[in-house]
Amino acid sequence: MDTSALSRRCTVVVGCQWGDEGKGKVVDVLAADVDVIARYQGGANAGHTVHAGDQHFVLHQVPSGILHPDKRCLLGNGVVVDLAQFFGELDQLVERGLDPRGRIGLSTRAHVVFPYHQALDLAAEAAAKRKIGTTGRGIGPAYEAKTGRRGVRVADLLDRRRGAERVGRGIAWARGRLVDLGADPGLAGTVDEAMAVAARVPEVATDVGAEIARALAAGKRVLLEGAQGTALDVDHGTYPYVTSSNTTAGAAAVGAGIGPTAIDSVVGIVKAYTTRVGNGPLPTEFDAGMDEKVRELGGEFGATTGRPRRCGWFDAVVVAYAARVNGLTGIAVTKLDVLDTLPEVRIATGYRLPGGGDTPFPPTSWELERVEPVYETLPGWQTPTTGVRTLSGLPRNARVYLERIEKLVDTPIAMVSVGTRRSQVIRTA
Ligand code: GDP
Ligand code: IMO
Ligand code: MG
């Protein structure tokens, strides 16, 4: 164990599997010691769960540092923001006694997700023969509009006339596409409906990159919070069963609006087993009985869509790949406690091809569908870990399991999480 990755000036927190690794929990814990927390990509497809005291929050757009009353929380230019969802989330936080006003900022360069993007997302999924299983939040169409240079940015909405003009063009484009998909073009909605949320934008609009640069220059500490996970990255993930953004640490600089040299630590969040929600390959997926058991033990239901998550054994091939593409300086292993009752635990240490021979993490989904994981079986610990606060206090077999992960991933463990609460972390040997 080596906790030094947790105490640097500018740290990226990145998911190392298929999302839902517990990024929200870890960011909330680490946020206590930093000044600024910024999301750098993704949108309301994310669902980050944070438990603080008796309260439980699922954050989709707002950074997971918001529960700490004195932290500045930012949404960078790489984020796609559904303004109705975003302001709704802020209002809910106010209702629940937290006041995020005045300490939340949204990049003027971030692209906006409108109801017509959501209509396109749902229509594309309905029409597709091979469905991705998206969250239906309009993420793909919003990023397509961005790279297609048809997008509408937060700054555009600060000028109502220009904003409405760009939204009008977006709706016209969406109507045509909806017709092509066999859907009702009326689903694209109207300019007035889309512009309804624009009035609140001046409350939050800011230059996020400039703010982060100023904070770092003043000696403050910054956390860059990733959404989704490495295997869902549009370049490095299981394409086409991925999200539409770069989720990996390299995107943190671009999406927060700072230079890569400002980042000095990358903490990978790694669930002690594997889950995936949506379609696409999952080499270590359990059989039906075990799937149900671990889903129950881990409460593995989507925080955004409520869909049951598919579960499987720890896949060291995926996480070692994530260590490389993210340049991890440390890992935080979460949900170790979920495995507490199992008589044995397995780790996939490699992949075998159907005709024999080993393969690294392949570039295509169809190849990944065909691989056979090579498993190592370790004895379980069958002792509760939820009350343990030091590495040496863990049952011996749990330590052996963690050491094996550390070795296979070739990255030091910086933290272990053994429950949903803030206090349920191990940060000392
Ligand atoms: P994220 O998207 O990476 O932030 O993860 P989610 O919030 O979607 O899913 C993680 C789930 O696991 C949430 O319900 C968390 O409250 C929960 N969780 C996080 N860490 C732990 C842990 O160490 N043990 C247990 N039992 N649950 C955890
Ligand atoms: P957090 O940040 C898990 C998955 C969807 C689908 C694919 C594409 O909570 O870890 P999209 O709506 O992004 O176009 O869907 O990506 N997906 C996630 N899975 N956690 C997430 O976020 C996810 N965000 C998207 O299920 O398979
Ligand atoms: Mg989640």
Image (spheres, rainbow, N blue to C red):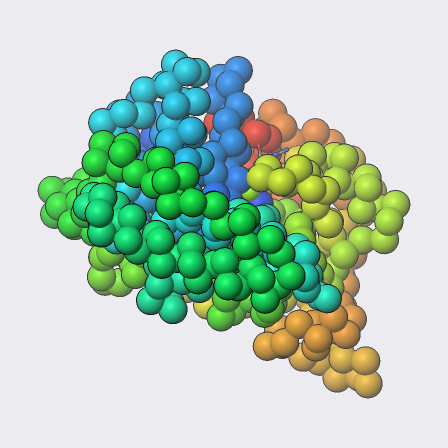
Q: Which of 135 and 239 is in front in this view?
A: 135
* Residue occupying the point 70% across, 45% down: 309
Q: In this view, does 287 lie above or below 362?
A: above
Question: Is residue 383 among what the camera can see?
Answer: yes
Residue 341 higher or lower than 170, as above or below: above
Q: In the rendering, at what x and y percent does residue 419 appear? A: 59, 30
Horizontal relation, residue 301 to residue 269: left or right:
right
User: Which residue occupies the foreground of this view, 11 or 205?
Assistant: 205
Q: Is residue 331 left or right of residue 279?
A: left
- The picture quadrant where one finds residue 199 is top left
Q: Where residue 11 sits in the image (x, y, percent)?
A: 33, 49
Q: Can residue 348 be seen in this view?
A: no
Relative to the observer, which residue lies in front, 142 or 208?
142
Q: Quadrant of residue 348?
A: bottom right
**Callout count:** 0
Question: Which percent across, then down, holds residue 65?
Answer: 37, 33
Which of the two residues, 123 or 94, is positioned nearer the viewer here?
123
Q: For ligand 3, give the image quadrant.
A: top right
- The residue depicted at 74 percent of the width and 60 percent of the height is 284
Q: Which residue is drawn at 43% across and 16% down?
A: 96
The residue located at (76%, 41%) in the rendering is 294
Q: In this view, does 83 lie to the left or right of 274?
A: left
Q: In this view, does 41 lie to the left or right of 242?
A: left
Give x and y (percent) for residue 379. Answer: 78, 48
